[in-house]
Amino acid sequence: MSTTNPTQRTEEERERARAERERRRAVAASPSQEQAKPMADTTGAREMTGGSSSRGGRLRPGAVGAVVVGLAILGALVALVIAHRKPTPRPLPPPAIVRIAIPEGYTRLQIAHLAAADGLRGSYLAAARRSSDLDPSRYGAPRATPNLEGFLFPATYELYAHQPAAHLVALQLQAFEENFTRADVRRARALHLTPYQLLIVASMIEREAQLPGDRAKVAAVIYNRLRLGMTLGIDSTIRYALNDFDKPLTEAQLHIDSPYNTRLHHGLPPTPISNPGLAAIDAAAHPAHAPYLYYVNGADGCGELVFSTQAAQFERDAAAYDRAVAANGGHVPACHRR
């Protein structure tokens, strides 16, 4: 049988009492289940209502679905806009420029061929019949003048490709008015001509003279013959009526009944027979002071005209030219002059 020391038992009891007090203090410091449960409920309520906490808020499941649907609609709209968006148009290339070089002495019909070949739209012949840009009667032309022949100034013009042919006519008429000056009008009056008649003379000079030195001499022949009441006898006027400037004229053609046949009819032809340039207009306004009444092509084929005052000399010069043509197989001799 064992015995317990009273002092030792008392110490053990005290130790148990301390342990019990420590346990009770620990229980008192911890919240009870009843106290912890409301806190958990409150946290859950914040989470369900999207309230904020120290860790950040959360969206309700319904709100998340709405956002997802909205984003899907927005994406679809963006895709629709992109699908139907027109591409940015590329800048158009600048229109092509065409240069139309119209030689001095070309007729309205010959210029029409150039305009068509260079791609201008519309009828040049129709556009060159009448124009609000120029009234031929202002220059002394009869009211019944059929077209603008003589006023279609020869030069090189730049236009956009496929522009109307009427635009070329407008540019030519503008150039004519810039180049046919008041001085030319005064010279016409000094020569007892209308400006339109001066233009007719210039158109014949343009067709007859190949070399610059011959222009004023041809003008002298025309004015001298008009003054003496002689027919002009200029074959270029017949060629204009026939619209044939290349082939040799036949005997029948030399006798055609036309107001442009200056072998048969006295005076000037009714209209210009070409569109003269500045040099021919200047020659018509300032003829050479010479008594010439005749001229014929030189026999050497170099384009120079041979002038004379007597019919007999003219006949000899014409015979020499005919022999040269016959010796060359019916063609104008080639020029061998250096």
Image (spheres, rainbow, N blue to C red):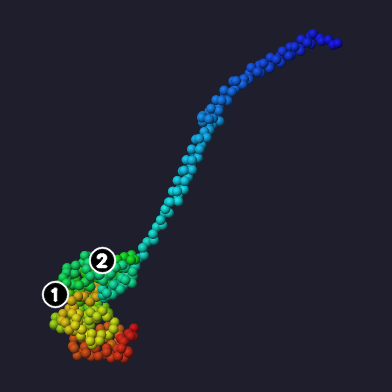
Question: Residue at point 25% right, 68% down?
Answer: 127
Q: Which of 171 and 222 lies nearest the eye of the viewer?
A: 171
Question: Residue at point 32% right, 68% down?
Answer: 120
Examine the rendered structure and indicate whether residue 246 appears above or below residue 82: below
The crowd level at tag 1 (other Cα within 10 Å; few <14, some 14-19, many 20+) is few
Mark 1 is on which residue type? His
Numbered circle sitting on residue 160: none
Q: CA distance from mark 1 to mark 2?
A: 30 Å
The crowd level at tag 2 (other Cα within 10 Å; few <14, some 14-19, many 20+) is some
Q: Which of 270 and 298 lies nearest the eye of the viewer?
A: 270
- Nearer-N-terminus badge (1/2): 2
Q: Is residue 204 left or right of residue 9?
A: left
Q: Position of residue 245 (x, y in %)?
A: 27, 80
Q: Is residue 9 left or right of residue 172?
A: right
- Tell me the quadrant of the picture where the C terminus can be found: bottom left
Labels 1, 2: front one: 2
Residue at the limit of the structure toward the right, as seen here: 1
Q: Position of residue 258 (x, y in %)?
A: 19, 81
Q: Position of residue 80 (x, y in %)?
A: 45, 48
Examine the rendered structure and indicate whether residue 294 appears above or below residue 87: below
Badge count = 2
Residue 220 visible here: no
Pointer 2 residue = 170
**Which quadrant would residue 25 be assigned to in this image?**
top right
Examine the rendered structure and indicate whether residue 113 appears above or below residue 333: above
Name the secondary structure under disc 1: loop
Pointer 1 residue = 192
Question: Residue at point 27% right, 88% down?
Answer: 321
Name the secondary structure under disc 2: helix
- Tell me the quadrant of the picture where the N terminus can be found: top right
Residue 28 visible here: yes
